[in-house]
Image: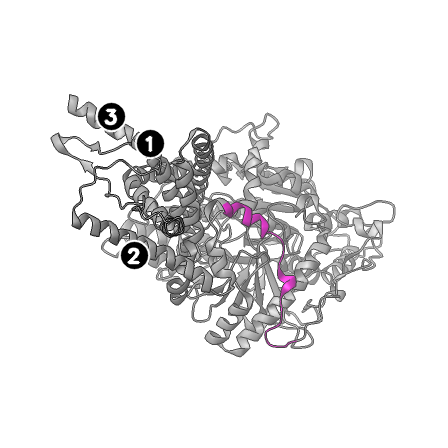
Amino acid sequence: MDRVRRLLGTVAARFANRRYVFALAVVSVLAAKAVHIDAHLDALSASDMVQWGPSFVLQDSILLLLVRAMLFAQGPCLGVLGTTLSSFVVLLCLMLASINISFFAVAGNELHWRNVAVASDSNSWSTLLTGLFSLGVTLTGILLASWLLQDLCYVIATMALDTIKFPFVLAYSLVSGNRRRSSVRYTNVPQNDSEGGGLEHRYTDDEMMESSEPKIAPPPRRRTSFLGLGLHLLVGLGLIAQIVSYATRPDRTAVTFMSWTLPLVPFMDFAHAAPNLANLLTQHGQDYNYDNLTALSDPVPFHWLPKDVKLPGFEDWHDHREHYNAEADPIKVSNLREPLLQPLRHMIKDVPIRNVVLIKLESTRKDVFPIKKGGYIWDKLEKSWQNGSLPDAAVERLATLSKTANFLTGDYDDGFDHPEKPRRGGINANNCHTTGTYTLKSLPGTFCGITPLLADMNQEYYSHVYQPCLAHIFDAFNALDHSSDSDKEGFKPYKWKSVFMQSVTNSYDKQKELMPIMGYTGERFIDSEYLRSDEAKFGKTDVEDINYYGMPETVLADYFRDAFASAKKNNERLFLSHLTSTAHHPFGLPKGEPYVYLTEDGNDLSGYTNAAGFVDRWLGQMLDIIEETGAANETLIVYVGDHGLSIAENGAVTPYYQPNVGNFHVPLVLSHPGLPPIDVNEVVNSNMILPSILDLLIETGSLGDTDTVAAKDLVKNYEGQSLIRPLRAHGESADVGNWQFTVMNPGRATLSVRDARHEDWRIVIPIVADIEWRFTNTKNDKHEDQSILDFGYPEFVKKVQDAWGEEASMWVEEASFVTRWWVDDNARRWRYESSS
C-alpha cells in the first residue's frame, strides 16, 4: 500500500511543478507549429524545408527560452513577476494550441482567428459544440505528452540557456581578470529512480540554486562530462542553425508566414486581413485597363415598372441610384443572340411552365448525383476495407443510392445494371461550379443571379443585394397591368405565389434576416421554428433533430403537397424553393432510416454517402407528390448543389477555407418532362440559373404579353448566360474571357476563378496576404492532387510557367488582374465598406 501511495504521490507531483508547466508551453508551441507547417506543406519545396526549416522555429525557441527564464526566475519580486507572466503565456499557448489542432483535426484546415466572431453568435454554439470531443482529445494529449516530456524539455532548455550565457560569462571573467571556473556547469540528465518499484524524482524545484541549476552532487566522472559537453554542443549547433537559417533566408512570404510563433498567430491573422491585390505587379509586361471601369451606371430603363409603388428588389429604379448594368460590365459575355440549342428549336413552344421549383442541395457533390461504380468515391470506400473489396450489403446500397439522380440527369453510365432507363427530361450541366461555398452566400448567388459579397459570413443581409431576385421578379409580374394582354386563357393570367421551405433553423448566421431581403417575407418562409410552433398549419411537429441545424426534410411533405394543391385550387402559379439539409455534417439520419456501413469503420465518408442516399429518396418523394397533384407536366424543377464537399479528397467535412475542386463542382439540372434530354459539358456557374429560368419562360410562351416584355428586359441585365442556348467562351473579342467567380467559405479571404476559354484551368486567388495562391489543371488531375501553391505572387507565377508553360503563366496573370478589378467592383455593387 505504501508503494502505491508513493507511486500516486510521485505521479501527482509531476503534474504540480514548474517543469511540467514549462513542458506545457513546449508541447503546445511545437505541436501547433507542426500542424501549421503540415497545413501549408504543399506551398514549400523539399529544398525550402531543408534550407529554411530551422528558421521556422526560431521565434518559438526565443519564446520558450524566455518562458523558461521567467518561470524559474529567483528573488521575491522577479520570482512573482516571472511566474505570473510565464503562467499567462503558458495558458495562452495551451488554449491556442488546443483550439488550432482540434479544429484542424475536424475541418482539415487551420482556424483563421479573424472569423472567431462567429462564436459570439449564440445561434452558432450548437455547431461549435460538435468540436468539443476533438478539443478534449487534443487537450488531453498535450497534458499527457507534457507529463512524459517535462524532464527532457527542461534539460534541453537549460542547456540552451547555459550555451547562450557561456560567452557572456567567459567575457566577463576575462575582462574582470577573474580566472575562477565559470559557474556554468554541465548538468546530468534528470532520471527516475525505480528502486523498490517506485518512481522517485532525484530533485525538486525547491532544490534550485541562484543560477536556477539543480543541486547535484558532482560525480566527476569523465564519461558524464563528455556526455554533457556533447549534449551542449548539439543544442548549441541547433540554435546556430536556426539563427543562420533565419539570417540568410530570402524575403519570401511563405517562409515568413511559417515562422510566426503561436501567441502571435491571432494578431498576425488580423494584421493580414486587409486586401492585398492592389500591390500586384505584372510579371509578363501585359497591360490591363480595368482599374477605372465599373459595371455600375444609371439603371437600365424599365418602362413597364409601376410608377406609383416601390417594388421590393427594384428600389434603385425608384430612387434613381446606380445599379448593375450588363452593357457597362467589361467582362460580361452574353449568349442571348445565339439560337436555341438544336434539340429545343422545334418543340419548345409545346412545353408549358406554370410552376417553378428551385431546390438547393446542401453539401452535394456532382459525383453523388448520381454515384458511380468505379468512381472516385467508390474507390475510396472500397480501399477502406481490409480486403480491398466492398461487402455485398454496401454494393447493394450503392447500386440503389441515387436512383432519383439517374432519372433526373439521365446519366445511367454508372456501372450498375438498370433494366429500365427513364429520364424526366431537361438540361443536365456536367461542369457546374457554385457561386459560393458557404450556403448563405450560395443562396443569393442562385436566387438573385449574382456573385455573393466578398465578405466573411452573412453580411449580405444588411448590404445591397444588387439585382432583383426571382421572388422579386414574380412579385413584379403580379404588380404589372395586364389589361392589354392578348391571351387570357390558361394559367398565364394567374398570380405567382412564392414560398421557401427548409426543415432546419433560420437562426444560424442571420439567415432569418437574409430571407426577407430575397423576397421571402413572413409566411413565405417555412423553417424548423415554424414547424415546431403552435402556428404550424399541420400541427406542431415533435420529430427529433438529425443534426445541429434541425430535422429531416420529410417533415415538409405535407407542406409541399399543400403548396401545389392550394396553387391548383386558387388558380395560382407556384414558385417553390427548398433547401435540403441531411447531407450536412454530421450526416445524421432520422430514426428508422437504415444505415449501411460503406467503410469498414463507418467514417464520415460513409455517413455522407448514406446521407446523400436519403436526400435522393426524398427528392423522389417530392416528384411523387408533384405527380399526385397533377402538376408534373407543367412544373420546371431546378436542382443545384449549394456547394460540394472535399470529403473524399482530403476528409474535409466543411468547405471552410477548402480550395479543392470537390467543394465547388455541383450538380445542376433544369428538369421538365416536356424537354428533350440535353447534356451541357461546357463551363457553367450557378448564377446562370436565374437568366435560364427567365429565358425558358419566355421561349416556351409561358408568360403573358406584359410579363414577356418585362422578362426580356430583365434577362439581358444579369451576369450569367442562358443554358438553353450555346454557351460562349468569350465575348465579341477573344481577349474577353467568360470569367466565373466563386466566393469561398467563409467569404473574404479567397476567390476561385475559372475562364471558359481554358475550362480545365482554375486559380484560387488570395484576397488577403496569409493564404496561398493555387493553380490546378483538371484535365489530367481531375481531383487536384498536384496543385501548384505559393504564398508569393512572383514565385507562384514562375512555378506555373515552369510546370505548364508560358500560356498558363500569362493566363494566371490575366486572371489575377481581372480579379483585382472585380473584387473592387463587387464591393461597389454591394455598397459594402469593410470595417477593417
> Which residue is at the front of the view, 458 or 632?
458
Expressed as whole percent of the image width and height from the top left, the position of residue 248 reads 45, 65
Up the image or down, 578 lies above or below 533; here it is: below
- Amino acid bearing label 2: Lys
Q: Position of residue 431 (x, y in %)?
A: 52, 64
The residue carrying mark 3 is 9
Q: Which residue is label 1 attached to?
A: 17
Residue 418 % position (x, y): 38, 59
Judge whether 280 appears above or below 535 on screen: below
Q: Check the image and report above or below for 712 versus 79.
A: below
Disc 1 marks a residue whose amino acid type is: Asn
- Distance between mark 2 and mark 1 Cα atoms: 47 Å
User: What element does badge 1 sit on?
Assistant: loop
Question: How would you rate the neighbour count of disc 2 (Cα within 10 Å): few for under 14, some for 14-19, many for 20 or more?
Answer: some
- Is 527 located above or below residue 221 in the figure? above
Question: In percent of the image, x 41 and y 65: which residue is there?
Answer: 48
| Span highlighted in magenta in the image | 264-286
- Spot the residue most to the left: 196
Q: In this view, does 241 lie to the left or right of 385?
A: right
Question: Disc 3 marks which amino acid?
Answer: Gly
Q: Calculate the distance from the C-alpha at mark 2 to the C-alpha at mark 3.
A: 48 Å
Q: Nearer the viewer, residue 655 or 22?
A: 22
**Residue 417 magenta-highlighted:** no
Residue 426 circle label: none
Residue contact between numbered discs 3 and 1, judged by CB atoms under 8 Å: no
Residue 43 seen in render: yes
Q: Earlier in the sequence, mark 2 or mark 1?
A: 1
